[in-house]
Every structure is written in C-alpha cells, then in structure tokens.
Image (spheres, helix red, strand yellow):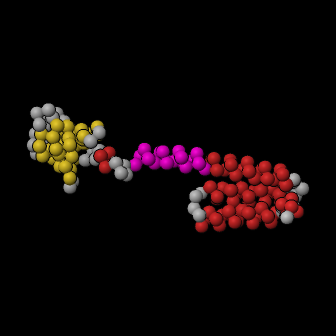
Amino acid sequence: MTEWLTSWSLWHWLVLGFVLLIAEVIIPGVFLLWWGLAALVTALVQFIFPNFALTGLAIFYAVLACILSVIWWRYQYNKDNRDQAQSTLNQRDHAMLGKQGTVREIAANGIGRGAFDDTTWRIQGEQLMVNDLVKVVRVEGITLIVEKVTE
C-alpha cells in the first residue's frame, strides 16, 4: 500500500484529475473543477519534468488548487455583486423607476395612492391632483417618489 502512495506517476495525476472533473459534473459545486484542473496541470508538470519529486508535485498541486479556487471565488464574488447591483429581480419597487401611472387619491400632505400597471402604490409628490399623470423618480422605503408629467 505504501508503495502505491510513494510512486505516483503521470497516470495517477491524470486519473485524479478526471475523477474530480467527473465528480464536478455529478456533484456540482464548481470547486472540484479547479482541483481537477490542478491535478491535470500537475500531470503536465510531471510529464515535462519526469524526475520531479512526489512531495514537490503534491505541494505544487495543493498550492495550484488553492490559487485556482481563490481566483475563481473572487471572480464570481465580484461578478455576483455587480449583477446584484444592476438587477431589479425581487425588487419590484426599484423596477418601477421611470414608470408612469395615474394618481388615484391624494392627501394634503402630498402622500396618496397611484395606479401603475395592474396595482396601486403609495406615492408622494408635490402639487398632485387625482387623475394626474405621474412618473416615478426614486424610491424611499415603500413609497414611490413621483413627479407630475408635463405633456
């Protein structure tokens, strides 16, 4: 058993790499992809430098797998943050920016209800009257801040 562990060849690294890549397909999680690629690169290093010590190859593999995983994590994390900042998914109030609607009711303090598409929203604006056409300019909590549309 110890002989198998101390005499890893190019084929061992290739098998490890492909097993990890197959495991990535079966158990998705992305990080196995980078560990599998690191094993394949380690096999390439052993092919180019056949006398490279197993300890050195193991350290090379571990460091490369960690580096690839961290690079991917940072890339995906930054991409997710950019996408989230630009997305209005599950933020219907922010998707309302720029939409036009009609004032349904309004109080003296400028707060009322406005009809937008198929629903009504709490609105706030200046000098609004019932049936005025308004446009959403920003969102504050659950209130749409609107301006009267001048035609």
Q: Looking at the image, which residue sits at the far right?
A: 51
* Residue 133 in view here: no
* Residue 34 in view here: yes
Of residue 135 and residue 20, the one placed in the foreground of this image is 20
Residue 119: percent from left, percent from top: 20, 52
Query: As drawn, is 109 to the left or to the right of 13?
Result: left
Query: As drawn, is 21 to the left or to the right of 44?
Result: left
Q: Pick the quarter of the image with the C terminus.
A: top left
Of residue 141 and residue 37, the one placed in the foreground of this image is 141
Residue 46: percent from left, percent from top: 83, 58
- Residue at screen point 31% across, 49% down: 92
Residue 48: percent from left, percent from top: 84, 57
Q: In the displayed structure, would residue 3 be above or below residue 134? A: below
Instruction: Specify the quadrant of the image occupied by residue 52.
Output: bottom right
- The span picked out in magenta is 72-87
Of residue 94 and residue 122, the one placed in the foreground of this image is 122
- Residue at screen point 68% across, 47% down: 67
- Residue at screen point 15% across, 40% down: 112
- Residue at screen point 59% across, 57% down: 30
Reply yes or no: does residue 108 show up in magenta. no
Q: Pick the quarter of the image with the N terminus.
A: bottom right
Q: Main secondary structure of the magenta part?
A: helix
